[in-house]
């Protein structure tokens, strides 16, 4: 499998590896994938309750080089974004950035799922509903 | 916390990167084999079937010498060796040729689930042609259960095709026992011995093997040449030809002989036989050292298939909680294979490992190390250090490893399969 330089860079120097305290109120955790499918991603975000800006993101991934790169890139991209901005990230953006071949598109889908799962977890913890999201600046 | 996977291990003196450790896929040509072949590409170019001049006689003599060299490594006679283009053709010729020849006697073929695709796909084709095929399971150690075999043989069984040694996990089937059972029941026994010939003792008479496939490029010989051993007496096995033409190879395989390739295959067999004992000892010592080094530094690793009946140069290990392809990426100066789905065209993990009862997650984490004639101890030391380093780094990245270390039972988690 020939990887792009960006995949190799993320694989060799993964960004934001680690974990956040998942019991903390301002942390959302997304765990997606399955060991038998060959990839599991855990993506965590720490959200500023005032601004809803994602101040920290951490990941750990079991998977191929593309899966590691996709999740590493996802943590880079969500950092500094508001929760609603982060939800705009699409798997196709990841495919483009990392130049993933067709057989590796599922890795980008999984990364998008991980972002959504982490945000979903944070929302659940903080009682944020969809309507509140649109009025988030009031919060 | 940054955990760069990139390693800066120093390369020991005398080790040249990349290191080739995939000798079950193919082997480099031994220079001695090349030397033997060279004249048959240039001055000695005759057609072995030309009966009227010295060019033909010279080529024929070389072919007959090779036939004898090949026969010797499996305990056969020269007349029982049929040349082919490789083991895939040999397996096709054996199964289709026997099926066709003995169709009136019966239509049942027995094989097993961890065979090479050259056997499995041929058997699928036979099913379409009206044959009944039994695919025996293997036990967790990779070996078939002889009782299963005995039970599977019925009065319509004409052929048993069980490989000698497996190409992924290196386990050696109880070939002599299988041969004995087949002989007692009057069933032809074919074995795909591609991985075994020249590596471990093979004796077609002592083991009651009737038909045997072998290949040049697995034993430091050239690609594109192989052979099929077909027993001529006690019992005489007949094979219906699959390629029609000039009636070469006792009518079983037409086509002008690949003289340089055949000379190379003969020489490769001669060298393999002469060096078999010492080389088997050397390779198993290197393999055991690799295994011991990995086991001394890494937890949650295990060998796939039995260690008790195994090719000397084979080690197939799962590094649990690390995905195989990402491991290969980290050790990209070492050529090995993985059972991971991500390394296959089908996105399915290895069917051989799954047949052992391994979960997909463990199959995804497997690496096949295939040591060969040109590997050195210094290379094995480097490989062990490198694998340890990369596995440790990838485990720092692995949520599964972290969860297991925290005492979480991964089987209790509801994973979303995708």
Image (tube, helix red, strand yellow):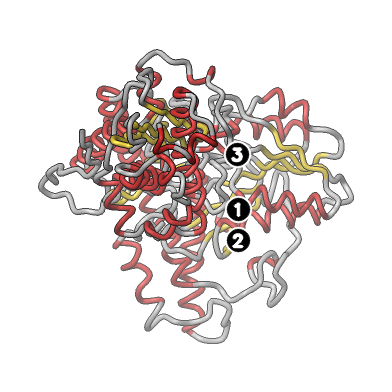
> Residue B163 versus residue B404: which sits nearer the camera?
B404
Callouts 1 and 2 on one subunit: yes
What is the chain letter for disc 1?
A: B
Q: Nearer the viewer, residue A102 or A97?
A: A97
Looking at the image, how many numbered discs can be counted on the residues?
3
Q: Give the distance between the C-alpha atoms of the residues marked 1 and 3, in whole angstroms.
A: 22 Å
**Element carrying mark 2:** strand
Q: What residue did someone put label 3 on?
A: B114
Residue at (38, 54) in percent of width and height? B27
Residue occupied by mark 1: B229
Choose mark 1 or mark 3, whichever is in front: 3
Q: How many neighbours does mark 3 have within 10 angstroms: few (below 14), some (14-19), or many (20 or more)? A: many
Going 66% across and 31% down the picture, which residue do you hit? B137
Q: For this rendering, which residue is in front, B398 or B146?
A: B398
Mark 2 lies on residue: B82
Name which of mark 1 and mark 3 comes first in the sequence. 3
Q: Chain of mark 3?
A: B
Separation of marks 3 and 2 at Cα, in angstroms = 26 Å
B99 horizontally vs B68: left or right: right
Please state if B340 lies on the left or on the right of B81 as rendered: left
């Amino acid at each position: 499998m020939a990887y792009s330089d960006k995949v190799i860079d993320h694989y060799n120097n993964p960004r934001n590896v680690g974990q956040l305290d998942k019991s903390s109120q301002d942390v959302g955790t997304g765990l997606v994938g399955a060991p038998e499918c060959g990839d599991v991603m855990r993506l965590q975000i720490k959200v500023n309750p005032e601004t809803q800006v994602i101040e920290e993101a951490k990941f750990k991934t079991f998977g191929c080089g593309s899966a590691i790169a996709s999740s590493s890139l996802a943590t880079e991209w969500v950092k500094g974004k508001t929760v609603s901005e982060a939800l705009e990230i699409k798997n196709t953006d990841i495919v483009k950035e990392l130049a993933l071949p067709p057989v590796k598109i599922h890795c980008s889908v999984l990364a998008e799922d991980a972002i959504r799962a982490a945000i979903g977890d944070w929302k659940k913890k903080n009682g944020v509903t969809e309507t509140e999201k649109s009025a988030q600046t009031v919060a | 916390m940054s955990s760069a996977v990139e390693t800066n291990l120093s390369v020991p003196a005398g080790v040249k990167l990349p290191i080739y450790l995939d000798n079950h896929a193919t082997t480099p040509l031994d220079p001695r084999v090349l030397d033997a072949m060279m004249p048959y590409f240039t001055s000695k170019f005759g057609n072995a079937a030309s009966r009227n001049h010295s060019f033909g006689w010279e080529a024929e003599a070389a072919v007959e010498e090779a036939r004898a060299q090949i026969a010797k490594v499996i305990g056969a006679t020269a007349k029982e060796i049929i040349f082919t283009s490789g083991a895939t053709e040999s397996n096709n010729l054996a199964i289709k040729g026997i099926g066709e020849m003995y169709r009136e006697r019966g239509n049942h073929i027995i094989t097993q689930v961890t065979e090479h695709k050259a056997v499995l796909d041929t058997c699928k084709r036979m099913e379409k042609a009206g044959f009944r095929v039994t695919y025996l399971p293997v036990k967790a150690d990779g070996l078939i259960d002889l009782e299963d075999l005995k039970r599977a043989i019925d009065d319509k069984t004409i052929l048993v095709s069980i490989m000698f040694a497996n190409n992924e996990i290196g386990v050696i089937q109880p070939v002599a026992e299988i041969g004995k059972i087949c002989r007692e029941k009057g069933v032809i026994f074919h074995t795909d011995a591609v991985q075994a010939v020249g590596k471990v003792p093979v004796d077609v008479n002592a083991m009651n093997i009737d038909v045997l496939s072998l290949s040049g490029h697995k034993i430091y010989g050239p690609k594109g040449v192989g052979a099929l051993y077909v027993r001529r007496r006690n019992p005489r096995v007949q094979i219906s030809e699959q390629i029609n033409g000039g009636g070469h190879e006792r009518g079983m395989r037409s086509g002008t002989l690949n003289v340089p390739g055949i000379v190379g295959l003969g020489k490769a067999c001669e060298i393999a036989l002469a060096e078999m004992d010492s080389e088997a000892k050397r390779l198993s010592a290197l393999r055991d050292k690799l295994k011991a080094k990995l086991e001394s530094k890494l937890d949650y690793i295990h060998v796939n298939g039995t260690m008790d009946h195994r090719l000397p140069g084979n080690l197939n290990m799962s590094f649990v909680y690390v995905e195989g392809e990402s491991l290969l990426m980290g050790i990209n100066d070492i050529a090995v294979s993985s059972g991971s789905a991500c390394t296959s065209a089908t996105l399915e993990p290895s069917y051989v490992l799954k047949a052992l009862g391994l979960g997909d997650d463990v199959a995804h984490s497997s690496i096949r190390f295939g040591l060969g004639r040109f590997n050195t101890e210094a290379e094995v030391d480097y490989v062990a250090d490198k694998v340890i380093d990369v596995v440790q780094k990838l485990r720092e990245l692995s949520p599964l490893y972290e969860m297991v270390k925290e005492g979480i039972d991964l089987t209790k988690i509801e994973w979303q399969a995708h």
